[in-house]
Amino acid sequence: MDILKYCKREEADPQYMWDLSALYKTEEEFEKAVKTIDLMADDFKKNYENKLKSQDLIKNAMDDYRDIVANIDRIAHYASLDVEADGHNEKSQKRAMGTFTKIADIENKMSFFETELVQVDEQTLEEVKNDTNNTRYIDDLLKKKEHILSKEVENAISKFSQTFSSFYEIYNTTKIHDITFPDFEVNGKKYEMTYNLFEGVYDNDPDTDLRRKSYEVFYNELAKYKNTTAMIYLSHCQAEKAESELRGYDSVIDFLLDRQNISRELYDRQLDVIMQELPKHMRKYAQIIKKEYNLDKVTFMDLKLDVENSFSKNISVEDARNLVKDGLSILGEDYSKMLDRAFDEKWIDFVNTFGKSTGAFCASPFLAHPYVLISWTGKLTEAIVLSHELGHAGQSYISQKTQNVLDNDPSMYFVESPSTTNELIMSRYLLEKATTDQERRYLSGQIISRTYFHNFVTHFIEGYYQREVYKLIDAKEGFTADDLSRIFKETLQKFWGEDVEINEGSELTWMRQPHYYMGLYPYTYSAGLTIGTQVSKMIVEEGKPAADRWLKALALGSTQDSVGIAKAAGVDITTDKPLKDTIEYIGKVIDDIEKYDK
């Protein structure tokens, strides 16, 4: 079967679908695991509630707590990944809903733990910290002590946890199930429209009539759901604000940054420096697109185009595997073996099926290997996207070898660094292999249009917009769909100036992004890529010493904050130099695109 063809899940080629049996081999095994974890939580509550006095008992409690958290992580991934692959499967939906209801119950039973643990005398906790498995967790707990509430209040918040997290599910339900797009016609030919087809095919199609018509059809349909989507988002933001106030934060932004262990200074600097210094380079890039396609003007609908229109190359999954392995071979033999496992053991879901989540992501259950979702388009750039997601997989794979479940995941600020480092290593590798200026121009264009446009433009604009939205929430002003569209359009206009026309419909782009339901996630793409740009440069220039340093940094998990992990890799993010150097590099690549012009 053609992997590029859209079809129902049951009609797709199993060879290119992920295998969730590494989590649970059968449905019965999964159901048994859920019941077992529930009993473990009952025992945890019975054995430790109101009893956390001695260091030995607390150490035992920590061991049991880690065990339960790891198993919760496993059942949660099993339930959610099935839905991500096929949101139209009613059985999977019901399983996921039931699983997350049960997880909420389990977590509620354990909600006493932190509130009681933080009240233990300091000397006892210092003894508990002597076990390195407990050190980081106890330190972080003490840092947020002033924001931990009474046991009764924490228990109440825990009971509402599923309700608070449901806004993301409601958004996704609207996006995947309720929004259906009509077919459309261009120059006598009919085209099918889906979210994945628009974002993966039409939005960068060189045929201007097709591309712009697809935008019109896509955004016209999206507009019908703007009020519902805005109300979902408002409810989510208000829930975050309510919790931030309960916990004693003046700003919801500070509340969300505290989860990342990142200062407001680093957050604001990332957004403000980029808005100040990057637009001039990207506006120049927009004019290159205008020239390449002989456009009378550049609109928002044209920004995803490849700057080298006459060069294109398709690639199979099998060829992409070899290309990714060769490109990332500088990371060593163990890393290459991990890449082989990803393909051989079916960690990756490539197929194009109805109901599948849009975009690409990597999920990393603690008690199993990572999983990658991607909708394969057959373009050469998919190899770069694949290397990106396998960068996430590599971080988790390496970290899980040395860290426990509570110390495995780095701060969200850092989380996109491993992925973008891989992406840039691959791009530099492909550039080195290029034999003509045309190919070099194409690949330089891909570095901008894929790596930097995605992370330093698309997600940056989302992050800048998100900060403005949270300012409204902090001021308790609320917002409507039209408010969100106005803020998003103003952000686009501030970035692109007079060089790009922000056509009607573009202001609704805020509706397309689920990251707004994941805290302050959008800005971290540029933060991670700032680190990734510097690390990939060092690896390419220094070779093995820099690669080894990077792999050791990845193994740190969350035992250090983002500043510490970046420092271990050789990057000092306490200053704005890495960020400004990255913006300068973006400008250089755009200059190279002009240099290689035919």
Image (spheres, rainbow, N blue to C red):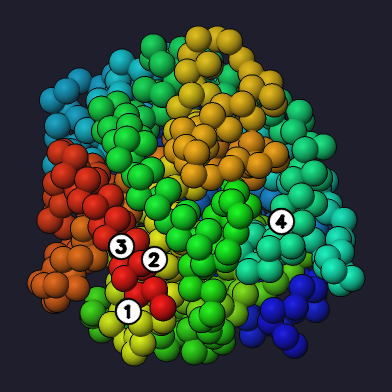
Q: Residue flagged by tag 3: what amino acid is it?
A: Asp
Q: CA distance from mark 4 to mark 2?
A: 24 Å
Q: Quadrant of the N terminus?
A: bottom right
Q: Residue at x 59, y 51 (%)?
A: 297
Q: Residue flagged by tag 4: what amino acid is it?
A: Arg
Does the residue at mark 4 contact the one at mark 1 (Cβ under 8 Å)?
A: no
Q: CA distance from mark 3 to mark 1?
A: 15 Å
Q: Residue flagged by tag 1: what amino acid is it?
A: Leu
Q: Earlier in the sequence, mark 2 or mark 3?
A: 2
Label 1: state its secondary structure.
helix
Label 3: state its secondary structure.
helix
Between disc 4 and disc 2, the foreground one is: 4
Q: Is residue 559 left or right of residue 382?
A: left
Does the residue at mark 1 contact the one at mark 2 (Cβ under 8 Å)?
A: yes
Mark drawn on residue 431: 1
**Label 4, on which residue?**
212
Q: Residue flagged by tag 2: what amino acid is it?
A: Ile
Q: CA distance from mark 4 to mark 3?
A: 28 Å
**Label 2, on which residue?**
447
**Label 3, on which residue?**
591
User: Picture coordinates of residue 192 (x, y %)?
Assistant: 82, 66
Does the residue at mark 4 contact the one at mark 3 (Cβ under 8 Å)?
A: no
Between disc 4 and disc 1, the foreground one is: 4
483, 1: nearer the viewer: 483
Q: Earlier in the sequence, mark 1 or mark 2?
A: 1
Q: Is residue 535 left or right of residue 460?
A: left
Q: Residue at x 26, y 60 (%)?
A: 588
261, 380: nearer the viewer: 380
